[in-house]
Amino acid sequence: MVFSFVYDIIITMTNYIPILLAAFPFLFFIYLLLKRVSTLLWASVITLGLYTTLAVFYWKIYPSFLYLSYGKGFFVALDIFIIIFGAVFFLEILKDLKIIKNISYYLGGLSKDYRIQIIIIAWLFESFIEGTAGFGTPAAIAVPILIGLGLPPIKALVVGLLGNSVPGVFGAAGTPIKIGFAGLNVAAVPLTAALLNLVGFIIPVFMLWIITEGRVNRKKEFFDALPFAIFTGLIFVIPSVLFVSLGQEFPSILGSITALLIIVFSVKIGFLVPKETLSLVGDKEESSSMSAFKSFLPYIILVSLLILGKIFVGKMGIPNFLGSIYTFSLFNPGFIFIISGLIVMLIWRDKLMVLASSIKKAFSGALYPFFVVFSMLAMVQIMINTGNNTSGLVSALSLITKSFETSWLPFFTPFIGAFGAFMTGSVTVSNIMFGHLFNIASINLGLNTSVILALGVVGAAAGNMIALADILTAEAVTGIKNGEVSVLKGVIVPCLVYLSLLGIIGLIIFK
């Protein structure tokens, strides 16, 4: 009897070995990152090495799939390298030309209150950029402006990442649902996702709480502006639901434009505006070295080219480059950043000498993120492709996801989606990773697939707050080095609260 008992224990433990091995490298990565045992780059490289070793010797992956995993990781990282290079190039030019400083000055003309300024930029302006372009560009554009308004760099990064969350459900003209869930029945997903996304009205509240941290009269400053923060959150998410009937391409774009028009009018008439006006840059007199139109012209050019690029080349791509199953999109925001920067250089003819320094800083700023993103994406691809093996084991990704295939799936789905965005920096890629698994699991459990998929995409958008690629992009354009842990600590609580609310709503729906 004792022998039988021990045998049963051994068999049970043996069944859990694949799951433990699948999860160990990722858990070790989290340990290295949060304990600051190593830099993000080395943590990523070590984790990739662990997964490669397991894939070869435990899963016995076919060599061709290991090659494809590394190949796809490289080419996706190259896409992101172009985005980061372009973003840094564009913003270095704007810094050298004092354009960021002038934009900060004119934003102060709308309201001198730092709480109103920051929420408008980080919530509404970022939502518009996410709706038109995505790819991590919103934070890259907004964070330098937030710093120009007097917000400390780390706080600016945290607030910028918070703003790059809710609109990601319909970011880049609906790509997360349209491409991420390709091949699945998604007819009811956009409306369901828009309704779940109503929870996003709390994001400006989190922004307000973070930017008032450390202030002498924090509670007063927070509660005085709280009605404005809630109102600003609602006037974006509610119109987004109304516009979803036009197609999944429009909620984030038209929702943010509508909200911006409403909020500008509201601020002008003083509706819900704090009675006491507070500034982060003091009361000293400032002046602008250029007109308002010329100050905002670079962003007008950038947004216009992003929209035109999305319309005319958004669906064009170069498939299967060098045998890797990956399609290069001809619409890469990095190219738009570069073109916009060159146009700005031509307009400011007397500053052509800043071109060389901007290129140098852009390359330097994009190189480190490239290696990190390559390591992480290659690891994710290995997790997916370990199912193609001679050992007969299912993939590491399937093993991890299978553990959530319970009646608690509605609660865990947003967290799984957020995990995908955290790892890859993309709501779309997260949906590609988990969409089919969500679909199959919900069918097996007898749950509404549209609701489960909607929970997944909204959770992935929330995961954008902690996306490594977006953090690195924002760090690159601000010149911050090794600030990942501080930034993650700033965004993790809002992210977990948001995901928990979504999970609870999911449980209530399927109660």
Image (spheres, grey):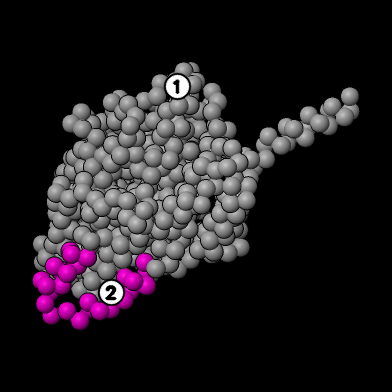
| Front in this rendered view, residue 378 or 319 | 319
Identity, as a three-letter code, of the amino acid under mark 2: Ile
Residue 432, position in %: x, y?
39, 40
Q: Is residue 506 left or right of residue 226?
A: right
**Residue at x 48%, y 58% (from the top left corner):** 375
The percent position of residue 136, horizontal first and vertical second, equals 33, 53
Numbered label attached to residue 359: 2
Label 2 and label 1: CA atoms lie apart by 51 Å
**Range drawn in magenta:** 338-366
User: Reading the chain from its start, which is encountered first: label 2 or label 1?
Assistant: 2
Residue 140 visible in this rendered orientation of the protein? no
Mark nearest the camera among 2 and 1 is 1
- In the rendered view, does 67 fall on the left or right side of 356? right
- Residue type, mark 1 in image: Ile
Q: Quadrant of residue 240?
A: top left
- What residue is shown at x 21% (from left), y 32% (from top)? 247
* Magenta segment includes 356: yes
**Residue appearing at x 33%, y 74% in the figure:** 361
Circle 1 SS class: helix
What residue is shown with label 1? 443
Magenta stretch: includes residue 360: yes
Instruction: Give neighbour class at mark 1: few <14, some 14-19, many 20+ (Cα, 10 Å).
Output: few
Q: Main secondary structure of the magenta part?
A: helix
Residue 48 seen in the figure: yes
Identify whether 220 is placed above or below 187: below
Q: Is 405 placed left or right of 371 in the picture?
A: right
